[in-house]
Image (cartoon, rainbow, N blue to C red):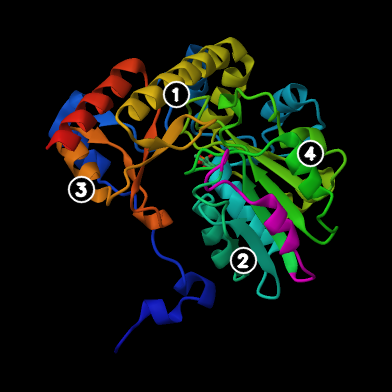
């Protein structure tokens, strides 16, 4: 019997490839031990609020029980934090799951999904998995005065059609670090017809320090087709637990609830997220530290004559003006992990997460050595 599992997979799945983590981190950890400097995944080296860790411990004895399928206690806390109603919130196993869920609920083979070139990698995957047609809109030019490779919202608005069903925006964006302001978003939303949903992925929201960008949340009451996603993985430093949320109109949340797996968010994640949310002093401390390190690292890299993209996130994208694969390999031989960008069509770039000062210094030392070699 000749059995071909791939040929039997549905058309959407056949078009997908398994996630490539870039490096085998468990192997690297064994090789380098505590000397490994991990700046490849935009994690938050400051760690979570101690209150979040205590909440996980408190939840341990009840591990034999299913988690609350509605996540009611966390939704009450989030609703208060976001100043919205509980039925406008959808919880996800990371915001990645929510980005996929949104496409599964709203996109299909008859419709198009719009996103920007150099936008977040999950957007094309969610589109493909839903069997929808992807429309990838060219990013702003590399030589753009203020926002190189940023989302081109005017061109995206011009590409909206009868067939468009969904638009994914990331603000600030990963992997470019670029952003657009509230006024620009509002102008875009005003051009979006009612048969199109707009997702604004705000995974890096807490790291924003520029005044022109607050949050798309303020526009949700005015635009029932707007969905804002956030995560506990970055500023809250709970990436290992997998929890994120979406805020939308209650109507959109109601649709998402139909397909959401009943126990998609585990009990530890629910408890830890609630405790982490209550500790805004911790978030503020992290935010200040990251912003300071972001400025410092950017300046150090510019001293090395490298092009650093403007960033409002906890990472910087750096253009080495030559194939960066050699530099990347040389860095990880020196126990520093950063993210190669070939998969994004940016082979001359590397994305470096902002760590604590010791990590950022270790990266700079390794980079200086790698560039000299
Ligand atoms: C890291 C990241 C996320 C967060 O993913 P989680 O699944 O919540 O860990 C979402 N969007 C973007 C753009 C990201 O970079």
- Is 373 placed above or below 304 here? below
Q: Residue 135 carries which label?
A: 2
Is residue 151 magenta-colored?
A: yes
Q: Which of 302 and 331 is in front in this view?
A: 302
Q: Which mark is residue 326?
A: 3
Q: What element carries label 3?
A: helix
Q: Residue 67 carries which label?
A: none
Please tell me in which quadrant of the rendered image residue 89 appears.
Answer: top right
List the residue tagged with mark 1: 294
Asked if disc 2 and disc 3 are in contact, CB closer than 8 Å, the reply is: no
- Is 192 placed above or below 48 here? below
Q: Position of residue 258 (x, y in %)?
A: 72, 54
Compute the Cα span from label 4 to label 1: 34 Å
| Magenta region, residue range | 145-163
Disc 4 versus disc 3: nearer the observer: 3
Q: Nearer the viewer, residue 229 or 268?
A: 229
Disc 4 versus disc 1: nearer the observer: 1
Q: Position of residue 233 (x, y in %)?
A: 50, 32
Q: Nearer the N terminus, badge 2 or badge 3?
A: 2
């Amino acid at each position: 019997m000749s059995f071909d599992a791939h040929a039997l997979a549905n058309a959407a799945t056949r078009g997908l490839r398994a996630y490539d983590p870039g490096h085998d981190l468990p192997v690297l950890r064994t090789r380098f031990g505590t000397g490994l400097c991990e700046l490849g995944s935009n994690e938050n080296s400051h760690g979570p609020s101690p209150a979040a860790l205590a909440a996980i411990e408190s939840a341990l004895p009840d591990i034999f029980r299913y988690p609350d399928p509605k996540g009611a206690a966390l939704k009450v806390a989030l609703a208060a934090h976001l100043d919205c109603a509980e039925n406008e919130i959808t919880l996800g196993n990371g915001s990645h799951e929510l980005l996929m869920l949104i496409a599964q609920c709203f996109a299909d083979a008859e419709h198009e999904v719009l996103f920007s070139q150099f936008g977040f990698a999950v957007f094309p995957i969610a589109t493909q998995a839903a069997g929808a047609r992807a429309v990838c809109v060219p990013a702003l030019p590399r030589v753009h005065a203020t926002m190189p490779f940023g989302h081109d919202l005017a061109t995206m608005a011009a590409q909206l059609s009868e067939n468009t069903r969904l638009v994914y925006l990331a603000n600030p964006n990963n992997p470019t670090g670029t952003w657009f302001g509230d006024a620009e978003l509002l102008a875009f939303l005003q051009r979006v017809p009612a048969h199109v949903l707009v997702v604004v992925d705000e995974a890096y929201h807490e790291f924003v320090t520029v005044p022109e960008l607050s949050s798309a949340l303020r526009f949700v009451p005015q635009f029932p087709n707007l969905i804002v996603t956030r995560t506990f993985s970055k500023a809250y430093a709970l990436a290992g637990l997998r929890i994120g949320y979406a805020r939308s109109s209650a109507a959109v949340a109601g649709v998402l609830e139909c397909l959401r797996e009943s126990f998609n968010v585990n009990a530890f994640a629910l408890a830890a997220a609630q405790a982490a949310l209550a500790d805004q002093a911790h978030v503020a401390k992290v935010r200040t530290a990251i912003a300071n390190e972001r400025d410092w690292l950017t300046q150090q890299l510019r001293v090395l004559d490298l092009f650093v993209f403007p960033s409002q996130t906890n990472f910087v994208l750096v253009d080495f003006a030559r194939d960066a694969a050699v530099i990347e390999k040389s860095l990880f031989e020196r126990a520093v992990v950063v993210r190669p960008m070939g998969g994004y069509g940016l082979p001359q770039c590397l994305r470096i997460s902002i760590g604590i000062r010791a990590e950022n210094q270790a990266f700079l030392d390794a980079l200086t050595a790698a560039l000299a070699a």
